[in-house]
Amino acid sequence: MANIVKRTFSMMVVLLLVFSSVGCGKQQEPQADPNSNSLDTAAEQAKEDAKKTGFSWEMAKGAKIKVLLNQHPYAEAVIKKIPDFEEKTGIKVEYSITPEENYFDKVTTSLNSRSGDPDIFMTGAYQVWEYAPAGYIQPLDEFINDSNLTASDYNFEDFYKGIVGALKWDLTPGHKTGSGSQWALPMGFEQYTLAYNKRIFAEKGLEAPKTIEELMDLCKKLNEFDGKGTYALALRGTRNWATIHPGYMTTFVNYGAKDFEVEEGKLVSKLNSKEAVEMTDTWVKLIKSGGSPSWSSYTWYQASADLGAGKAAMLFDADVVEYFQNPEGASKEAGNLAWVPAPLPEGKNQVNSNLWTWALAMNKASKNKQAAWLFLQYFTGKDYQLWASVNANLVNPVRNSVFEDPSFAAIIEKADGYAQTFKKTIDGTTIQFTPQPHFFETTTEWAATLQDLVGGKYKSTQEAMDALKAKIDKIVEDVEVE
């Protein structure tokens, strides 16, 4: 009997210690430590939410979801935190990762099957213009606005308006993004700026350009600045839509040009307008006077590598592409790079930029939508965004609070002019193209015309753009605008 009492007393002591330890944990405020390996920062908040609204991170415990990811640094960051998500929610995640050259074909095939696999996938804003009208993507508004499904600290208003708005659309071709349903949520994004090698500029006694005219002058001065094989300005040039959407489209809208207008219920190309012709003529001159001899084969990768290697003195492309060449050890010219906003036409002062954002979307055919929404919510939430921005090269973060956080600010302050350029550009950053279902075909034709102009096929830029307009009007003639 005495032994039983002793054992019982011992068990009671153990239980009291356990409950005491748990109780102490409850009294502590969760710490948002960006360097922590765990993002379970809101256990207490989640319990309070559950009492008030029914929300709980464990509401889909036991579910299994499949996630399709593009091979990208953003995806690598997600993969590192999947175990934390699984622990926090009790949801099992099966993911696959596919190289970008095959990725969108795989996504389209998977969505077209209507099988519900994958539940979540990475996408860009331009792809939404095909997937949403086809009924492939689940609108997210009902999840975002339901306090039973969304944590009280998710704070949708913390997203940069132009970035999250780029993934909103009302499904009407010709109508700009920013209204309608929220089809996806951003993971990270890029805007288009000019990076330059400040070492080279200092040696030559040059200053960074503010205008297109100054950029043109620099292209002439810096051509073969360090002998054959070196050149002034790195730009994309392949016969692909991706050649048009960074520096070219950013400059296009800064000239006041438009890709389409709606006339009598139809989309009409405006690529042969005065503004479009003037801008394109200038762009061709930039390429001829200071571009790479291999420009027509250049993707972002070759252009970025040339800046990092010191072959190119400047790069007009994604701020994040430029950024990855600058950290210590990343390239030969690491630490020598600096940033300024996109050069503007003389007399203009409003800086606009086109946008690319990688985003997460939910398959409309998913059979695990609650679990899928928790995945979306977690990997676009503030805690994850801060961790990934500080620890996993997630630039640019899509939330204002993350960009302004001291831990992230300390990292990007090492990139000369990066934060200042970001802040000057962000208010004018969004999708500058007109949404329409033939986007990839029309922009590829656009890139082909640009190549032909540089190659001397046309007598004038006006002739080339007139011919391009005719081609594009033919491509979109089946598109009706309500």
Image: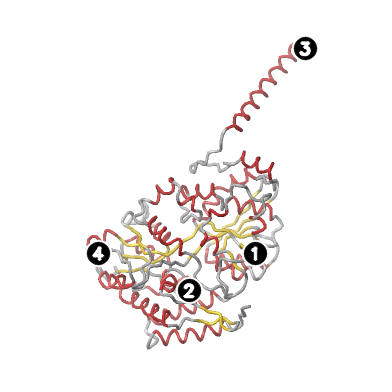
The amino acid type of the residue labelled 3 equals Met
Q: Residue at x 37, y 84 (%)?
A: 456
The amino acid type of the residue labelled 4 equals Leu
Q: Of helix, strand and loop, which one carries label 3?
A: loop
For marks 1 and 3 on the same chain, the one whose residue lies earlier in the sequence: 3
For marks 2 and 4 on the same chain, the one whose residue lies earlier in the sequence: 4
Residue 458 in the image, given as x and y percentages of width and height: 39, 87
The amino acid type of the residue labelled 1 equals Ile
Q: Residue at x 59, y 66 (%)?
A: 179
3D distance between C-alphas at marks 2 and 4: 33 Å
Residue 384 in the image, given as x and y percentages of width and height: 54, 48
Q: Is residue 30 above or below residue 339?
A: above
Q: Of helix, strand and loop, which one carries label 2?
A: loop
- Mark 3 highlights which residue? 1
Q: Which mark, by number, is residue 240?
A: 2
Q: Which mark, by number, is residue 267?
A: none
- In the image, farthest residue toward the right: 1
- Mark 1 highlights which residue? 137
- Colour theme: secondary structure
Q: Quadrant of residue 207?
A: bottom left
Q: CB atoms at circles 2 and 1 under 8 Å apart?
A: no
Q: Is residue 24 above or below residue 58?
A: above
